[in-house]
Image (cartoon, rainbow, N blue to C red):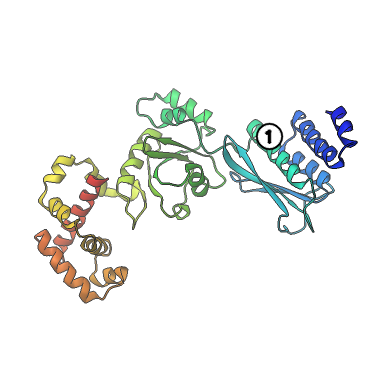
Amino acid sequence: MEALAVRLSHLDSQAEGAIRVVMFYDTLMRRRVDLPALARASAVLAECVTGIRLHGTGRAIRTSSDGREASTPPSPASTTASITLDEEEIGTVWLERSGAPGSLDELMLDRLALAAAAVVERYGPARTTMADPALVELVISSDSDEAARARALRLLGFAAELPVRVIAVRSQLPLDKIGCLVCPGRPVKAAPLADVGVILATREDLARFPAGVRAGIGAADSPDRSWREARTALRFTTPREPVIRYADLGALALLAEIPQDTARENADVAAIVRLADNPEDLETLDAYCATGSLRRAADLLHLHHSSVSRRLEQIGKTLGFELTQPTGLLRAGLALTAWRLLDD
């Protein structure tokens, strides 16, 4: 490599610099440096503040050109690059150079990102969110014995004392992105199983689920039971309530145990099936069942309460009972939920 650099130096000083950057990072990787040492060496080489951030921890390492921790407020990055491991973006590296980027800045950050990925793979503290589906299935399967389940959790990076929550997800978004969002800075793993995604998390933040995601969250301490609960909770999700904890279902969870043929034969559920041909009526009934109040339903639908009252009167005729009575509201809510479980 050094001989090649010498030969290239006679032809192109830019090429010589590029080779020296490559050699520099090859040396760092052979020496198995950690992330802080990698940031220090890179900052000295770049002669400007250099940063490394891993999505899994949320912590940034910023080092100034003298090799010390940067004490200045962060400046806009002049050049950035993604740290990628197993085809997943796990972090970012950047330079905070005042003025125009240097001619070798892009190459340097590419090599820094590769080196950072190698460090993470070797030492941690964060591995990729996406996991081997076979390991995840071992964790959540009711057929797994406890020894096999514990071993799979260890291989996935979960400490024995950490409780693991299971989340069942349906979404067009990548599972790793969802996992990192809802469980920031803590161990989290994800894998697709058939048409449902699985996220194993040590905690979850309902407010951080992105739009368009349907998710059910198990409550049990045992991952296999938590998985069953998560799938059940997922069945209860709606556009109005896209994320549901199993623990919040209470007695409603019993509806998921009713055989589907039995539910279809119920007169109230059959009436909802007929009502479903009119999306406007279905939306009105949903709003009324969700709020329990004509006026609050009108606010939710952005309609005058008299319009909602007329709709509910007509819907009541279709269902065969008076919606404004307490028992009518209860029957409508149960029938609507049972119908949704049929449609899944």
Quadrant in which the C terminus appears? top left
The quadrant the N terminus occupies is: top right
Looking at the image, residue 303 lies above or below residue 101: below
Q: Residue 122: where, in percent of width, then height?
A: 65, 30
Up the image or down, 179 lies above or below 3; here it is below
Q: From where the camera sits, is residue 325 visible? A: no
Where residue 65 appears, as percent x and y from the top left, is 83, 49
Crowding near the residue tagged with mark 1, few <14, some 14–19, many ≥20 C-alpha atoms within 10 Å: some
Residue at 17% from the left image edge and 72% from the top image edge: 310
Identify which residue, 325 or 171, lies in the foreground: 171
Q: Quadrant of residue 127?
A: top right
Q: Residue at x 50, y 33 (%)?
A: 131
Residue 317 placement (x, y as % from top left): 10, 64
Say whether residue 330 is left or right of residue 224.
Answer: left
Q: Pointer 1: what residue?
A: 119
Evaluate whether residue 60 shows in this view. yes
Which three-letter amino acid code belongs to the residue tagged 1?
Answer: Val
Establish if 46 lies above or below 15.
Answer: below
Residue furthest front in the image: 11
